[in-house]
Amino acid sequence: MAKKFVPFNELSMYPNVLVVDCFHPDGLVLSHWRGAPKIEEVHDDTSTGIVLNALEQQLPELEQYQYVTNNHFDIDGFLGVWSLCNPSLALQHQQLLRKMALVGDFRELTLETAEDHLALQLVCWINYVEKERFYAPFASYAPGKNEIRLCISKYQFFLQQFEKALKNPEDYKHDWQEEYEQVLAGMEALRQPSSHIELRENIRLLIVQTPEPLHYYALFSQSAGADMVLSLYNNQRYELEYKYTTWIDCTRKCFPRIDLQPLANQLNRQEDSPYLWRSDKITDTGPILRLTEEKLSKEQRFDHPLNRTIYSSSIAPDELIKIVRRYFEQVYQEVPLKSRWKWEEIRQLNQNLQMKN
């Protein structure tokens, strides 16, 4: 049975609501958020995957609910909501939707098939329309800055329009083409001799060396086996970022997040530029360690590296890599790989590390 979208802030008005890609105690939760209730037989890495598994398996609980909601708008959350509102069509296109969710949430993609390209094109269409018609994710200029309230208009629009773009993507090429080609150019840059990609499996660190900052979908495209991405650009410009996959309850095994500030302090002791190494808290959806003049806003951190200033460091690339590797090899040497880390476990581990140091 197709569900109807209702605003998250009106949840108390509806007795039976499916809660997608977030959490609320009054409703059936279909979310990969860490700590949110899980239905084990349908759990997946993305919330869209959870919804599609529930539809495919004809989860009996779905029949008890008429409505669906979410407290924010992003690719994964929207596709989960749309799938519950259009179950038959969603199952027809489920592999495409799963790929779109991976691109939108994890920035992971391959471009080996026509369906892979279509997934990227549709994600780029949503991105473009979201920014042009509404506001960019985490935008500081969003009126009122209340995502729960503001995202309603996005859902109302995209729930009406997505099927049209899905069935006739070429009709919307003028919207998705620029970003799509930007991603293709970035992935081509990674194939050039001037770029080098290395996965350090023992600490699940992907090291990407390439001349200039890239679009995230290109930069993270090969990061499925990693928890962190270390980006090194010409002129000794660097960023280290924990992936969103380490914020949620992924099925894949990972290491827990470790506070990046001690690493920043270590780098600052060697840094001889006018700037300081700073890091975001590990509870952020995508904490970044970088050399900077001032902390980035959430909107700037979510935006692509090619759209922000990355300052040159006095630390040579090989030395930077050595320092980062040594830091994580030391802290992870006695830490197991596992899925479903709890925030309590992560906090306790970091407290123990602070006491040792």
Image: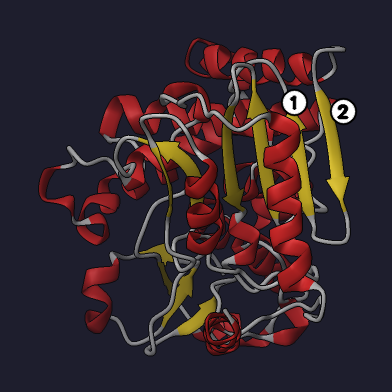
- Which of these two is toward me, 299 or 24? 299
Residue 136 percent across, percent down from the top left: 33, 36
Are circles 1 and 2 on residues that touch, CB within 8 Å?
yes
Q: Count neighbours of disc 2 (C-alpha within 10 A) and say few if under 14, some if 14 to 19, many if 20 or more.
A: few
Asked where in the image residue 249 lies, by quadrant, the reply is bottom right
- Using residue 211 as the reference point, say whether residue 343 is left or right of it: left
> According to the image, what is the colour scheme of the structure?
secondary structure
At mark 2, the secondary structure is: loop
Residue 116 percent across, percent down from the top left: 78, 32
Q: Residue at x 79, y 68 (%)?
A: 252
Q: Answer above or below: position of 243 versus 162.
A: below
- Using residue 69 as the reference point, say whether residue 150 is left or right of it: left
Q: Count neighbours of disc 1 (C-alpha within 10 A) and say few if under 14, some if 14 to 19, many if 20 or more.
A: some
Asked where in the image residue 236 lies, by quadrant, the reply is top right
Mark 2: amino acid: Thr
At mark 1, the secondary structure is: helix
Q: Residue at x 69, y 51 (%)?
A: 324
- Which residue sits furthest left? 144
> Residues under labels 1 and 2: Cα distance?
7 Å
Asked where in the image residue 168 lies, by quadrant, the reply is top right
- Which of these two is toward me, 295 or 312? 312
- Which of these two is toward me, 119 or 57? 119
* Label at residue 113: 2
- Using residue 88 as the reference point, say whether residue 305 is left or right of it: left
Residue 145 percent across, percent down from the top left: 17, 51
Q: Residue at x 20, y 58 (%)?
A: 149
* Label at residue 349: none
Q: Residue at x 66, y 29 (%)?
A: 316
Image quadrant where one finds the N terminus: bottom right
Query: Residue under circle 1?
Result: 117
- Using residue 300 as the reference point, say whether residue 346 is left or right of it: right
Residue 138 percent across, percent down from the top left: 32, 46
